[in-house]
Every structure is written in structure tokens, then in C-alpha cells.
Image (spheres, rainbow, N blue to C red):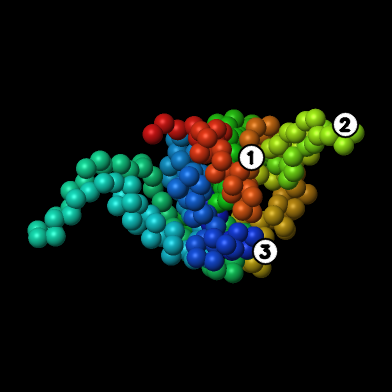
Amino acid sequence: MKTVILAGGLGTRLSEETSIKPKPMVEIGGYPILWHIMKYYAHFGYTDFIIALGYKGEYIKDYFLDYSKLKNDFTIDLKTGTITNHNERFENWKITLVETGKDSQTGERIRQLKDYVDKTFMLTYGDGLSNVDIFSLLKLHYSELKYATVTGARPPARFGHLKIEGNSVVGFNEKTQTDSGWINAGFFVLDKKIFDYIPEENVPWEDKPLQQLTKDGQLACYKHEGFFQPMDTLREKSILESLWENKLAPWKVWNE
């Protein structure tokens, strides 16, 4: 099964970094968040990726073209022109990189991938990490018999919770998620029928397509009670960095 990753947005709220690179290439622990997402899917055995490019798509292309060189130690003999790898490390991934337009909305990016995907495929955004159970997500999708399934997650809380007595703080909880409500966390499973819902109008996927799927009773929801954290701001990037550096990253399920 193919996994589509939307990687073409501008990432304006991370402009300190995205002025020189696309948002999915902003690094967490020395690796692009896109790499973390792909490693997560690969843990479940899904290694056939389609990446929808847009803003600074050439940066992503160059990264994967140079991936082996960046991951391995090697010796270059300038006299003979030979290169010797010392620790051959690679990922068993197939990656299709598709230019979908710098100014394309998410719906338009998906629409352009119709000929690249099979009857059922997965889709996610290139800027959020989670420990959603992909196997359980797929099981729900097949049991519901709908054209689309979205993962719903609890929204991360913006601020820590203070417990105050008088003028003294007696408790502080830097909560990672709120206790109520659900948001679109991405991690979709989609039937190819969804392309009938995407007009040729350069619309967001989250607008007309998902709204019409909902009206037609064709959108199921997998409720994920675990970790979910988008990376829209420098603060959220710092949260992910801290989790990774302290070996507390819930999405780190693979072994190196």
C-alpha cells in the first residue's frame, strides 16, 4: 500500500527556518521531520512513499538523491576516483517525488496524484508526529466500508496548567494534550473514490472534499487517544526536539 505525504506547504509560522527549506525538512534531532514520519510508517511495513512537492521541492529531491552519501562514512581516493563505503546504511524505501505546484492547496496536490495511487492508500501531512497504531487504523477503515477514514486526536494544549493557592503556585503541569474535543490529525486511509470529491478548483482537502464526504456519510474517524504533536511553530519544534533528545519520543518505535 502506498503512503502519500503532503510536503509542499510554505510553513509561514516557522519562517525562521522555512525561508531556506520546506517545512517537512525542518530537523528534529538532526533529521527532517519528514524522515521521522517515513521511519514511523516503515516500522509498520509501509515503505512505498509518494511525496507531494511544492515550495522548495528541489530541497527534498536533493536530500533523497544524496541520502546514501549523507548517511554513510566513506573514503574518497582522489587519485583513482574510487569511493569506499565503510558502513553501508540504507532504508528499504521506494520514494516517488511529484511536483504538485508551489501555490497548490492540499486538495489540488492530492488530485494530481490520482494516477500514482492504488485503490486504497494512506495519506498524512508532512509536519506532524504521532504514535497512532497504523494497523488498528487500517482495520477500522476496512470495517467501516467508507471512502475515507481520518485520525482524530486530542489537540495539544498551548499552555501549562497552573494550580494556585492564594498567590502561590502549588502545582504546574506542562500538559501535552487537552482533555476534550477532537481535531484532524491527518493519518488518513483513503479509497480512490475520494478523487470524485476533489474539484479542479485548487481547494484545500479540508474544505469541500472532506465536507462533502462527511455529508455523504463517507468519512469515518479513528479515535487516537495517544500522542499527537503538529509542528507549526518554533515552540512546537522545541517540544519535539526535547522529547527526541531525552529519548522520550513516543513516535520512536524503530530500532537503529
Q: What residue do we see at 64% from left, 60% from top?
A: 13
What's the mark number on residue 228?
1
The answer to whether one can see residue 255 in this image is: yes
Estimate the x, y position of residue 220 in percent, counting from the top left.
Answer: 70, 40
Q: Residue 112 vs residue 203: left or right?
A: left
Residue 212, above or below 16: above
Estimate the x, y position of residue 197 in percent, counting from the top left.
Answer: 67, 56
- Of 170 and 158, nearer the camera is 170
Residue 83, above or below 104: above
What's the mark number on residue 159?
none
Determine which residue is flagged by label 3: 203
Q: Residues within 10 Å of mark 2 (few under 14, many from 20)?
A: few
Q: What residue do we see at 72% from left, 58% from top?
A: 208
Estimate the x, y position of residue 222 in percent, counting from the top left.
Answer: 67, 36
Say what amino acid the circle numbered 1 marks. Phe
- Of 122 and 71, nearer the camera is 71
Q: Residues within 10 Å of mark 3 (few under 14, many from 20)?
A: some
Determine which residue is flagged by label 2: 165
Residue 88, above or below 6: above
Lower position in the chain sequence, tag 3 or tag 1: 3
